[in-house]
Amino acid sequence: MKTTRGRPRGFTLIEVLLATMLLAAGLTLGFATLRAAGAATERGEAMAARNERMRAASEFLRGRIGGAQGIVFKLDEATGQAQRFTGDAHSMHFVADLPDYLGRGGPHLHELSVDGRESGQALQVDFRMVVAGKTLETVDARPPEPLADGLRNVQFAYRTNAQDGTLGSWQPQWDYPESLPLQVRVEIADARGPWPTLVIALRQAANGGIAVERKK
């Protein structure tokens, strides 16, 4: 630092302003870096949570739908036709064993349905015990349980064999309630985009006789 007549010279106003500007720029850059790191962490946590939700819901659907047993849960009052599996684009009904961690086990009617809400659609499941071909409404009763909510779209589709023995086309309505479909497709999308499509083979579909797709 230069001196004048033996005394040190102070900083000029320009030097002070320049130092202040450099300090402010450094702090701004530091805060921006911290914000970017925090945002990246939040995005990573949100992605991990979404992946875990997709994995849990997909494993549940694959296990429950794939384990459908073809047990009669209802008789059509008009025709007397046995109902083993019913389904459309937003709901399906079938009987499968209830895992022990969800209740007392044994065959239960599974009702998968899409519930529309203000915050988005919700995929939910309802369980009711089945005994001797009848669904018991009061045994082990519980409200529907949500599998996933905040969804943008949920679609079910079904297919069986075509008349030439090959797999038929996907249909939004299952028209053969006395039989199980060979495959069920589940398509789900949330605010971040579509989930991986599930194509589930029903292990016991052949036990009750395989439905053949009708010509339209």
Image (tube, rainbow, N blue to C red):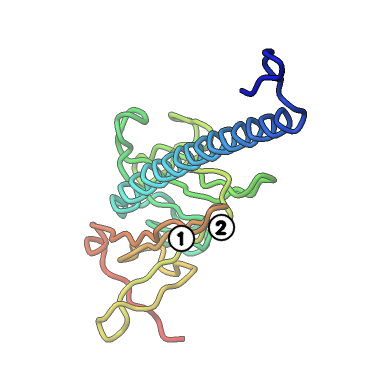
Q: Residue furthest front?
A: 5
In this rendered view, identify the residue nearer to me: 25 or 62. Answer: 25
Mark 1–mark 2 distance (CA, rounded to whole Å): 8 Å
Q: Classify 176 as above or below 131.
A: below
In this rendered view, identify the residue nearer to me: 34 or 119. Answer: 34
Q: Secondary structure at mark 1?
A: strand
Mark 2 residue crowding within 10 angstroms, few (<14) / some (14–19) / many (20+): some
Q: Residue furthest top?
A: 7
Callout 1 touching callout 2 (CB < 8 Å): yes
> Residue 62 location, x and y as percent?
32, 51
Q: Secondary structure at mark 2?
A: strand
Q: Classify 102 as above or below 166.
A: above
- Residue at left offset 23%, top offset 57%: 203
Q: Is residue 75 left or right of residue 210?
A: right
> Residue 148 location, x and y as percent?
50, 43
Q: Earlier in the sequence, mark 1 or mark 2?
A: 2
Q: To which quarter of the image does residue 4 belong?
A: top right
Question: Which residue is the site of mark 1?
Answer: 187
In this rendered view, identify the residue nearer to me: 188 or 94. Answer: 188
Q: To which quarter of the image does residue 16 belong?
A: top right
Mark 1 residue crowding within 10 angstroms, few (<14) / some (14–19) / many (20+): some
Q: For the N terminus, which image quadrant?
A: top right
> Residue 15 location, x and y as percent?
70, 31
Question: Which residue is the site of mark 2?
Answer: 153
